Structure formats: C-alpha cells, structure tokens
Amino acid sequence: MAKDTPPRWDRKMQQRLARGEAAALGELYDRFASLVHSLAHRVLDDDTLADRVTREVFAHVWENPEEYDPKKGSMRSWVAGLTHRAAVQRLRQTETAALADGGQGTTEDMEQKVRRASVAARADYIVTSMPAPLRAALELAYFQRRDYRQTAADLGVTEDEARRRLRLGLQLLSTANEQRPAAAPPPGYGSAL
C-alpha cells in the first residue's frame, strides 16, 4: 500500500459517520475511547475532566466527520489530535480559573504545566502507536532494565536487530519533546474543538 493511501477502515468510517450511522460512532468509540481518555487524563490528571473531554471529542467527531481528511493521516491520529487540543484547552481553562481565584502560581507556571503535560501525552501516544516490535524492545529496556543483548535474547532476534529497534524506538520517542505550540493541531488539520 502506498504511503499516502489511507487505510480502508478510516475512509469507510468517515463515510459512515457522514451518513449519520450511530453504529459507526459506537464502533469508533469502542476502538478509540481508551486512547482518548488516557491522553486526556495524561494532560489533565483528573478522571472527571478526562471523561468530559472524551465526550466532547466524540461529539465533535459525530458532528464534524467531514473535518477528517484521510490524505493527511489516520483516523487515530486525527482523533488523538482533537483530544490533545481539547485537553490542553481544558487545562488552560482550569488553570486560568484557579489563578483568577487567587491560586498559587503565575501564567508562566501554567504554561509550563501545559507544556509538560503536552509532552507527556505525546510520548504516551507515540509509544502506544509504534509498531509492536519497537514497543516491546523499549519496554524490555526501560521497564525491565535489559541491555540490548538481553533484549535480543528475550525477543529472539539478533543483537543488531535489537539495537536497531531500540534506536528507532528512542528516535520516535524523542520527537515528543519537540517544541511546538501546546495546542497546535497535527499538520493539515483545521479548527480546534
């Protein structure tokens, strides 16, 4: 499949949503609800607010399926981008309200908190989205403190392959720390929620 050809499921899902098929929304929710909630929770560190953002994201998808452009990325990436923007917007609102109510900190502190939460959410998304072989190698190296030789043995691959997987996984993960505006949409995606 060519790189710019979107997966068939994404195109069909968009068409079904555009026709107003409630079953399509249910299927999309089943597939992505845990991703949406975990990304929102990672940014907000609050279950109630993450639940609210999850509802907002799926409502937005239901009301605006035409915003998704399969040529610009996967449905998963689009939904994750919507989630990230909505969670960051909600975090700014709650932090601004706390500052206005005489809370501790400054606007700079709030923006730093938003940036940290944003980087953490992007890192989580990158790890959950990377291919299973890369993720498995990183998990062995990070959580079980395996070196590349032990990782190779555990995965049943050559040491060179283990090093390659670790290097590529770390390169992907390092992109989470790239400085982008905290609420910036993924390239090619339009309006915020």
Image: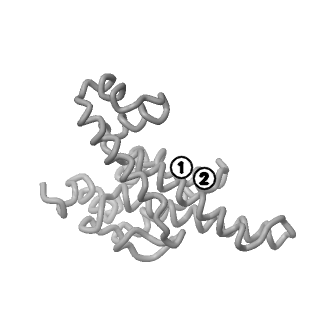
Of callouts 1 and 2, which one flags the residue occurring earlier in the amino acid sequence? Answer: 1
Tell whether label 2 touches label 1 (CB within 8 Å): yes
How packed is label 1: few (under 14 Cα within 10 Å), some, or many (20 or more)?
Answer: many
Q: In this view, does 104 lie to the left or right of 107?
A: right
Q: In this view, does 192 lie to the left or right of 107?
A: left
Image position of 99 with respect to 59: above or below: below
Residue at numbered disc 2: 50
Task: Name the quadrant containing residue 132.
Answer: top left
Residue 37, disc: 1
Task: Name the quadrant containing residue 74.
Answer: bottom left
Q: Position of residue 5 (x, y in %)?
A: 17, 61
SS at badge 1: helix
Q: How far apart are marks 1 and 2 (CA)?
A: 6 Å
Q: Which amino acid does label 2 sit on?
A: Ala
Q: Which of 9 and 157 is in front in this view?
A: 157
SS at badge 2: helix
